Image (spheres, rainbow, N blue to C red):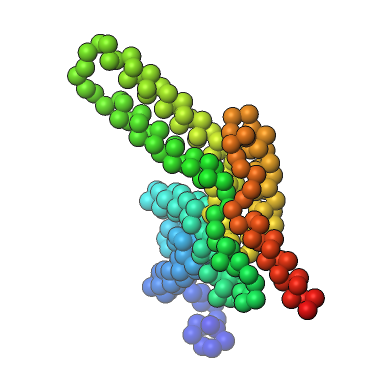
Amino acid sequence: LIDIGVLKPGESADDDQAFKILFRNVWADNADVVSRSYSGTGALKTDFTRTGERTRAGMVQDLNNSITRYVKTNFGAGPRQDASDLVLGAFLPDSTRTGSSLVFIDRRPVLIQSIPYVLAASVFMVLISSLPRSSSGSAWWPLRLFAILWLAIGLWCFRFIYGHGVLYVNWPKLNTPRWANEGYQETMGAIRQDKIIGSFVARHERGASTARISHLEEGKKRIQ
């Protein structure tokens, strides 16, 4: 700025209070735009960028952004990453590949897919059972046993989801990270050894055989 004559030697941009405020706000706005493109929320600590100090409102906003990022990253980032890979050319569709429509299919066993729904149903049942109502003493114990049963089911479902979270992350389907595939296979292997649901989990995944056939078809075309 000194070289182009905007500032005189010895002057600083901080001396112009209006320019400093404008520059900080432009910088923070740019940070929010860039952050939304990859995280789905605005940037963190923009209160410090705008004002030069941390505020309680800024901390609350950062907490909200962090929780939103966690939810979006784990449960909604897969399609966003797939779209980015297609637009940027990180994934090139193969028109000769048979069974390509199965790329986006959920290959988890149905039992694994249903556990979050069972958890939601158990929470609903417990809430319904806890509602106050006028009833005779003879109906009190069956109702409490019903609530305890669903509470136990809900706690088990929550424990299962928490312990096998890799199965419930919305991974990108086009360029799935290798470590995510390895973690999925390792977790499924551990579930098949589970004493409660191990015998109910099918060893065949949806779309797996078709994927193998597609590789065989590609091999035939290469040989021809």
**Residue displayed at 76% across by 70% down:** 219
Q: Find residue 222 and report its horizontal and vertical position in percent.
A: 77, 76
Left or right, residue 189 beside residue 141:
right
Q: Image height check: is 134 above or below 160?
A: above
**Residue displayed at 54% across by 88% down:** 4
For the C terminus, which image quadrant?
bottom right
> Front-most of 169 and 9?
169
Q: Quadrant of residue 138?
A: top left
> Front-most of 133 and 17?
133
> Front-most of 27 and 98?
98
Asked whether residue 56 is in view, the answer is: yes
**Residue displayed at 49% across by 74% down:** 13
Count of number-bearing discs: 0
Q: Find residue 88 and report its horizontal and vertical position in percent.
A: 58, 76
Left or right, residue 57 beside residue 95:
left
Q: In which quarter of the image is residue 87?
A: bottom right
